[in-house]
Amino acid sequence: MTAKKAALTIVDVTLRDGSHAMKHAFTEEQIRDTARGLDEAGVPYFEVSHGDGLGGSSLQYGFSAIDELKLIAAAKEVCQQAKISVLLLPGIGVKEDLEAAVTAGAEMVRVATHVTEADVSKQHIELGRKLGLKTVGFLMMAHMAPTAKLVEQAKLFEEYGAEIVYAVDSAGALLPYEVTEKIGALRQSLSIEIGFHGHNNLSLALANTLAAIDAGASYIDGSLRCLGAGSGNTQTEVMAAVLDRLGYETGVDLYKIMDVANNVVAPYMPRPQEITGGSLILGYSGVYSSFLLHAGAAAKRFQVDERDILIELGRRKAVGGQEDLIMEVAAEIARS
């Protein structure tokens, strides 16, 4: 076996990014069983919240079947060592949501903004630090900004007090050389740790994760069986195996992480996380991965091709928070 390299921290997002694929309908039993498996496998952090973060349960983004604070508390009940992370998008989640999440058991917050809008996060980053949370800046849709702009925005997160900054490939649109460039620039420009969150819409999530690690990322995201928006994320159990082969220390037990993926998560998945026509177009056109199910519903309602909807959304440079634009675009296509 190859000599071990520097340690990496895996953050599993099955119970947050997977909420998109589950239509925000996780049960407390599913949360407990998955959280217990992640904890026993040695995953240090895993995320629990609505797919669009704290406060995301709404008509705009989709209502949660069960209040996310109950889900966080359910996960906390079964954890011996793993710590629970939550996602917060300023403007969707508010400070009171974060305080309530901490009471429920959260120990990490990832404050997420569009790649050019880190300036809206200051109060949330500062609150995360004040509450004693591991506090992370999460720059979404990283493919939509030049590397210099990404670095500029990451420096704002660092200035506000973030301990880690992520480049987030929300659309699964980045190619490995682009990841290398962006992560490398962040590593050279910041004194804090760097993370990477990938989506698999172009079948590049694992390749991009490895490129990120080579360029200096030390926090990396994955989801069990790829359960996540679009075609899902870097597959946690596969990533753990590959990283072990490469000699990286993650602290994750391969057999145990495989067992929770295959015996717990797979049975409740609504569908396999395949690269379909729609999810492929997400990556091809650079559209937010969580738009996939919304686009499918709009295509069915207006009897148009979901690929046409997604291509047009990409042309308009739609970003997270503009889900209402999906129906508008579908209606326009139907009239044309």
Image (spheres, rainbow, N blue to C red):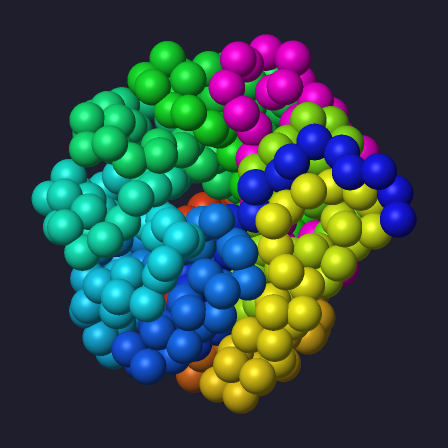
Magenta region: which residues?
176-205
Q: Is residue 24 visible?
A: yes
Residue 174 screen position, x and y as percent:
70, 43
76 horizontally vs 5: left or right = left
Image quarter (top left, top right, bottom left or bottom right) of the C terminus = bottom right
User: Eyeballing the image, is 23 above or below 144?
Assistant: below
Front-lying residue, 92 or 105: 105
Task: Based on the picture, tell me whether residue 55 belongs to the magenta stretch.
Answer: no
User: Eyeballing the image, is 114 above or below 296?
Assistant: above
Q: Is residue 111 visible?
A: no
Front-lying residue, 172 or 75: 75
Residue 91 screen position, x and y as percent:
23, 42
Front-lying residue, 239 or 297: 239
User: Eyeballing the image, is 213 above or below 156?
Assistant: below
Residue 247 screen position, x and y as percent:
80, 42
Residue in view at x 14 percent, y 43 percent: 99
270 horizontally vs 101: left or right = right
